[in-house]
Amino acid sequence: MTNPINPANRTATNSVNSNTAKPQNNEPAARSPAASSPASEDTVSLSTQSQQVIELQQHLKNTSGIDSARVDAIKQEIARGNYPLDPEKIAENLINLEQSLIE
C-alpha cells in the first residue's frame, strides 16, 4: 500500500491513464466573468501604527546609532584625566561579553 501523503513511498507509475486520449476540442475556452471585465484597482491603507513603524524604520536607516559628540567629549575627558575608569567594572563587563558570545 502506498502513502499518497508521503511522496517517498509512492511508486513510479503515472496516475493518469495514458491509454485514454483526451477529446480534441477546437472551441475556444470559456472565459470567466473576471477575465472579461476590466481590471480593477486595489487600494491599501495603512493604520496609524504601521505608518509610525515605517517612519521609525526610515529614521533608523538614516542614523548611525552613535552619538559622536558624546564620544568626543568622553575622549577629551579621558585625555585630561578627568574621566573615572573602574578597572574592575571594565573587566567584569568584558567577562560578561565573552560569556554571552560563547552561549
Image (spheres, grey):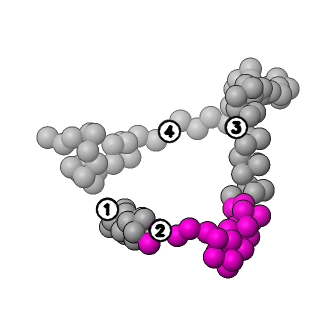
Q: Residue furthest left?
A: 1
* Nearer to us in this view, 52 or 46: 52
Q: Does label 4 or label 2 sit earlier along the sequence?
A: 4
Where residue 12 appears, as percent x and y from the top left, is 27, 54
4 or 3: mark nearer the eye: 3
Q: Residues within 10 Å of mark 2 (few under 14, many from 20)?
A: few
Marks 2 and 1, how far apart at CA: 26 Å
Find residue 56 and report its image quarter. top right
User: Which mark, by number, is residue 86?
Assistant: 2
Q: Does label 2 or label 3 sit earlier along the sequence?
A: 3
Q: Amino acid at mark 4?
A: Lys
* Nearer to us in this view, 75 or 44: 75
Task: Check residue 85 for magenta coloring.
Answer: yes
Q: Does label 2 or label 1 sit earlier along the sequence?
A: 2
Q: Are marks 4 and 2 in contact (CB under 8 Å)?
A: no
Q: Does label 1 or label 3 sit earlier along the sequence?
A: 3
Marks 4 and 1, how far apart at CA: 62 Å
Q: Quadrant of the C terminus?
A: bottom left
Q: Are marks 4 and 1 in contact (CB under 8 Å)?
A: no
Find residue 61 and report its image quarter. bottom right
Q: Is residue 12 left or right of residue 96?
A: left
- Write down the region rendered in magenta: 66-87
**Secondary structure that dominates the magenta span:** helix
1 or 3: mark nearer the eye: 1
